Amino acid sequence: MRARGAWGWALPEGGQSFRKGGENLEKQVNVNEKIRAPEVRLIGREGQQLGVLPLKKALELATQDELDLVEVAPNATPPVCKIMDYGKFKYQQSKRSQEAKKKQTVIQVKEVKIRPKTDEHDLLVKIKHIRRFLGQKDKAKVTILFRGREIAYADQGMKVLERIQEELKDEVVVEQAPKMEGRNLVMVVAPKS
């Protein structure tokens, strides 16, 4: 009889529940006695093909080498198994995934909001913020906010964005040219590579 979870549902073989968090959702790999096929296509420890063998014979060969029999292609007919050190294999897999995460870079879009009548000094402070974001290899979204009747003076907002482009011309690439989005004028800049 199969084990039952907290809500009475039948659990998969081994009695482990599958959580959305991810720990038990990893790809289940059958090792040694957990392999259910009567015959397997065997690959030796050096990668050589040993042919189709009964499961008992394959397990004997793995135990002779003091290694594990790991099912690498369970959907093949017959399933493909390899003689290897399973602990070392899992360790190398985790190291590879950690290295991939290290090399991965996440680019964020930081937003700077400005009003069309922002004074000179305040505008210079906002430009300084944009420079800091670009120095961190992030993109910057510059938004000019129009309130009430200010929308009639959209040309003033364009002048502010042109001023920002002029100040940062050596450091940025304009990814999205200034355009109206509702009552806001938006421009996206990215650091030069």
Image: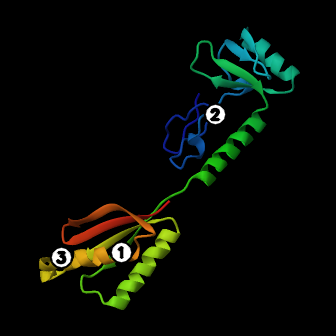
Q: Quadrant of residue 177?
A: bottom left
At 66% from the left edge and 49% from the top edge, which residue is drawn? 99
Tell me the residue that label 3 is attached to. Answer: 155
> SS of the residue at dot 3?
helix
Q: Which numbered disc, 2 or 1, marks the residue that appears first in the sequence?
A: 2
> SS of the residue at dot 2?
loop
At 50% from the left edge and 39% from the top edge, which residue is drawn? 8
Amino acid residing under circle 2:
Gly
> SS of the residue at dot 1?
helix
* Distance in Å between CA atoms under marks 2 and 3: 68 Å
Q: Which numbered disc, 1 or 3, marks the residue that appears first in the sequence?
A: 3
Q: Are marks 2 and 1 in contact (CB under 8 Å)?
A: no
At 23% from the left edge and 71% from the top edge, which residue is drawn? 184
Tell me the residue that label 2 is attached to. Answer: 14
What is the number of the mark on residue 166? 1
Q: Residue 129 location, x and y as percent?
A: 44, 78
Q: Which of 177/70 is in front?
A: 177
* Distance in Å between CA atoms under marks 1 and 3: 16 Å
Amino acid residing under circle 1:
Glu
Q: Residue 18 location, x and y as percent?
A: 54, 41
Q: Could you classify mark 3 by the number of other residues whose Cα lies within 10 Å: few (under 14), some (14-19), or many (20 or more)?
A: few
Tell me the quarter of the image containing the N terminus: top right
Residue depth check, mark 2 versus mark 1: number of the one nearer the observer: 1
